[in-house]
Image (cartoon, rainbow, N blue to C red):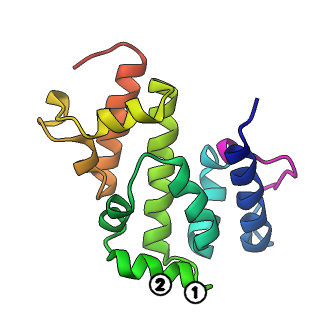
Amino acid sequence: MKTAMEKKLDKEILNLLKQSIHPDMAVPLKEDLTYSDFLSNKMLIVSAIRAGIPYSLFDLIRTYTPFSENDWAEILNISTKTLHRYKMSSTPFKSTQSEKIIEMSEVTKVGMDVFEDIDQLKRWLDTPNFALGSLKPIELLKDSYGKELVIGELTRINYGVLG
């Protein structure tokens, strides 16, 4: 059973993709596309990143993830003031910021598959991890390589391989 938040995410991502998919891209867009489907389709992700994530979608993603406004500002490498400006304008996020938004969505999806609870995921992200060089996983999310390390560790936890 889908939550109201998941239904909103499904609708918002479908609207974005309807507007952003280039006609020459050989990517079929199903009317019943879900947020989860989107996160598992790299071509759709590329299309969304190139179009730029609108604040309305970011706001839903922000609510769905375990990250605070300050976390988001740091992850996106912008000030909270700039984050507020995006909210007030109709300008979508730049492609580098859009990519980070999608990456944090992926981290959240994998983390929720592992912990099934947003508060447990948040605690894990904020706790130093021996397998990650004794850093807090959240500290590694500022770049793509760190994100891959965090997702790799979450995947190992999910399969019971502790390192």
- Name the mark on residue 85: 2
Nearest the viewer among 14 and 66 is 66
In the image, which residues are magenta?
27-37
Q: In this view, does 99 lie above or below 89?
A: above
Seen at 46% across and 25% down, the residue is 114
Coordinates of residue 75 in the picture (x, y in percent) = 33, 62
Disc 1 marks a residue whose amino acid type is Ser
Q: Using the numbered discs, state the Cα–Cα distance from disc 2 to disc 1 in whole angstroms.
A: 6 Å
Please tell me whether mark 2 sits on a helix, a strand or a loop. Answer: helix
- In this rendering, the count of numbered labels is 2
Specify whether 2 is left or right of 115. Answer: right
Which mark identifies residue 89? 1
Could you tell me which residue is drawn at 58 percent across and 85 percent down? 91
The residue lying at 40 percent from left, 27 percent from top is 155
Q: In the displayed structure, does residue 84 sit left or right of residue 156? A: right
User: Image quadrant of residue 132?
Assistant: top left
Q: Are the two marked residues, 2 and 1, in contact with CB atoms closer than 8 angstroms?
A: yes
Q: Can residue 46 be seen in this view?
A: no
In the image, residue 114 lies in the stretch drawn in magenta: no
Horizontal side, residue 77 vs residue 106: left or right: left
Q: Which quadrant of the view contains residue 128?
A: top left
Name the residue type under label 2. Answer: Arg
